[in-house]
Image (spheres, rainbow, N blue to C red):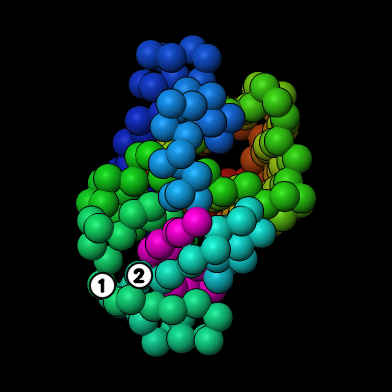
Amino acid sequence: MVCRQPNIASRSQDHWDDDPQGYRSRRDIGQRRSDDAKVQRLKMNSLHILGGSGHGKVVAEIASLLGYKQIVFVDAVWPERTENGRWPVVGKPTHDHQPMFCAVGRNDVRAELFEEFDLWDSPTLVHPSAIISPSAKIGAGSLVVAGSVINADARVGCGSILNTGCSVDHDCLLEDFVHISPGARLAGGVEVGAGSWIGIGAVVREGVRIGRNVMVAAGAAVVQDVPDAARIGGVPAKGL
Ligand SMILES: CC(C)(COP(=O)(O)OP(=O)(O)OC[C@H]1O[C@@H](n2cnc3c(N)ncnc32)[C@H](O)[C@@H]1OP(=O)(O)O)[C@@H](O)C(=O)NCCC(=O)NCCS
């Protein structure tokens, strides 16, 4: 029943509590740092992508669509996997590789890298085809992949992945480092704790609270609250 992921804390809830207007959404970054706009514009030209897996390619293509001109991979572990001729790889990441976006799929590893490279101000990348409610807030270093819909007053923490064609409905609250896999559906008012992974095509009934570091298997239907570190699947979802 215990998930392989270690405990991951969430910072976003603290920030939201401090700042009820929301924090670190793309919109906020643009508004709140207008004095820093020139620096931001210059930084917009380059992006270091940490992690050269298939997920990294998805991130690179979204960044390119958003206007980043110089995209460079940093990956000390698998530099050969990013040698695809499209983007250069500079090997081991350092603190000088700024701005940096973490494109590591595993929630626990992403959380560690956020701390190691202090990525709490990294950009939020949203594919142009995603539909984001004007009242939704999405944290720094989060990725929204093509076709996703994030509805009214949803809150998404930092370093999260909202993967291809997922939907996060009104008033959902997602803490840091969650992964909503392709095609997964969260009904209104669902809460997802830090580090949890909702598998591909899973559905979650309205108002359900999913704890931290939970694994929801592909295709599951979650109809009741889930404790921290649980691993569940099936229709209706039960412990695996
Ligand atoms: C839940 C999951 C992590 C289990 O993977 P695993 O640890 O390799 O486990 P196994 O495939 O060995 O299966 C273990 C048991 O769980 C069951 N199981 C696996 N996946 C299941 C699922 N999606 N729904 C219901 N039961 C499932 C298996 O039938 C098996 O049961 P058994 O012990 O009675 O034979 C995996 O199946 C899964 O759903 N991953 C999510 C994939 C995903 O969303 N990818 C998107 C990437 S962007």
- Mark 2 — residue? 74
Tell me: residue 158, above or below residue 128. Answer: above
Q: Amino acid at mark 2?
A: Val
Q: In percent of the image, x 56 and y 48: which residue is there?
A: 125
Q: Residue 61: x percent and y percent?
A: 61, 66
Tell me if 195 is positioned left or right of 129 in this view: left
- Mark 1 — residue? 92
User: 218 or 136: nearer the eye?
Assistant: 136
Q: Residue furthest front?
A: 38
Tell me if 7 is positioned left or right of 64 in this view: left
Q: In percent of the image, x 47 and y 73: which residue is there?
A: 53
Q: Amino acid at mark 1?
A: Lys
Q: Residue 6: x percent and y percent?
A: 30, 50
Mark 2 and mark 1 residues within 8 Å of each other at the beta carbon: yes
Q: CB at mark 2 closer than 8 A to ligand 1?
A: no
SS class, disc 2: strand
Tell me: residue 83, above or below residue 160. Answer: below
